[in-house]
Image (cartoon, grey):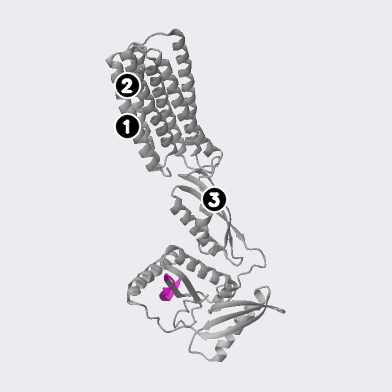
Amino acid sequence: MTSAPARKEVRRVLIITLVLNLTVAIGKIIVGSISGVLAISADGVHSLIDSASNVVGLVAVHIADKPPDEEHPYGHRRFETIAALFIGALLLLTAWEIVTGAVERLREGSTPDISPWTLGVLVVTLLVNLFVSRYERREGRRLQSELLLADAANTGADVFVTLSVLGTTLLIALFGWAWIDPLAALVIVGLIARAGWQVIRRTGSVLVDTAPFKAGELAALVREVPGVIEVNRVRSRGTPDAAHVDIDVRVARESTAERSAAIADSIRKRVREHYGGVDDVVVRFVPVAPGETDYALAARARADALGLSTHEVRVIDTPDGKTLEMHVEVPPNQTLGDAHEQVSRLEHEIRTSIPGIGAVVTHIEPEQTESVVEPAAQETESERVRARAEALLRRVYPDDDWHDMLVTPYEDGFAVSMHLTLPADTSLEAAHDRAEAAELLLRTEIDEVKRATIHTEPPEAPSDAPGDPNAA
């Protein structure tokens, strides 16, 4: 139960159940007092306790519906759990009272008075209990209400209790076995005590913060999010319909704040979609240890700032340090001298800004300008992916200039590449941040996109065609 409308429905279910329980309780207590059948009176008291628990539930749902505040930053849902715990305690108290009455009846040895009214009340009680039990269980599952499910388990025990009482009454009426009445009451005590213990155990596990989700399953789900290198720790507490989840993940040391925020949003979305009733997901980032630099990502960031694309990045360990080899794509229709000047600037940026790099070896090549011919079966699907990608980027980044999109088959989906024009004075970190965030957005929001490449460029740069979709 995670919304105000759902809580209103829970209140409606509790009110209907309260009216039915009160009607049955009053009828059983009156008939039990007139006939002297202890089992009927005991069951009537039990139904009265059910009514009291419904009242407690209504109060708890009202409090639980309040929004979080300074004193209760995680909300007021625990009041509903406490109410369910109170129901369990009332059941155990009821069991004790019935035991006391049964022992007293055994000492006295009196015979109860059985009448058609007695049997009629029991049959009506059985029918009402069956309806209430199924009704609360169905609504509890639909609304994901811990309180309704607890009360449904309690009412389910009432069905067996009423069957026991009905059988006892028939045996007394047919054979005069008065001694079976207190014994049946003791059986009823066992059923009530069992229901009470189940409620206490279930609510107690919530109060001591037993994890509602399996840590291994949750960690495996988070690992599927692009950009997550490793899941360090996952924790969950609360109920499955209102859980709080804490996740610690490792990301690349070069990840910027915007890229990290995009990864966090993707994690929250995936967890909420998989589990449904999750109130809060807290994501903490742990950077990789120094020395674990993602050289491809770092080189890509420097190239993006200069309006270049890189791929096939390879790191070679040499006696003089690490040598970085990579392919650099430059805009076509220019001289070798102009292209070399651009790439030389990139090499200088990499050597001076990435620790451990002793030399940079580059292979200069023009950007791909030829269109890739797609199979006819994939053409329509690629157009749909293109339309969705364009709409998504323009919705999330409405002020940015996205153009020259290319969608090509890649593995079991598609690769998307396009150009993004940013102001010439945009910092290297900001340009890389925007490109990485957009790529992550495309891969997480569109399942068919298996690879995304964003080529950033200043306004005056030529944009003849997008970069190689297989670029790193």
Circle nearer the N terminus (1, 3): 1
Label of residue 122 in the image: 2
Residue under numbered circle 1:
131
Badge 1 element: helix
The Cα–Cα distance between marks 2 and 1, rounded to whole angstroms, is 14 Å
92 vs 239, nearest the viewer: 92
Q: Which x, y percent locates residue 122?
A: 32, 21
Residue 331 against residue 399 in the figure, above or below:
below
Q: Quadrant of residue 412?
A: bottom left
Q: Which amino acid type is shown beneath numbered disc 1?
A: Phe
Residue 287 belongs to the span the image colors magenta: no
Q: What secondary structure is the magenta-colored segment mainly?
A: strand
Q: Quadrant of residue 160?
A: top left
Circle nearer the N terminus (2, 1): 2
Q: Determine the residue located farthest toward the front in the rendered image.
A: 175
Crowding at dot 1, Cα within 10 Å, few <14 / some 14-19 / many 20+, comes out as some
The Cα–Cα distance between marks 1 and 3, rounded to whole angstroms, is 38 Å
Q: Magenta stretch?
A: 400-413
173 vs 366, nearest the viewer: 173
Q: Which amino acid type is shown beneath numbered disc 3?
A: Ala
Any part of residue 56 in sight? yes
Circle nearer the N terminus (2, 3): 2
Residue under numbered circle 3:
215
The Cα–Cα distance between marks 2 and 3, rounded to whole angstroms, is 48 Å
Badge 3 element: helix
Q: Which amino acid type is shown beneath numbered disc 2?
A: Leu
Crowding at dot 2, Cα within 10 Å, few <14 / some 14-19 / many 20+, comes out as many
Any part of residue 12 in sight? no
Badge 2 element: helix
Q: Which x, y percent locates residue 54?
A: 41, 29
Q: Residue at x 44, y 81 (%)?
A: 465
Q: Which x, y percent locates residue 184?
A: 41, 19
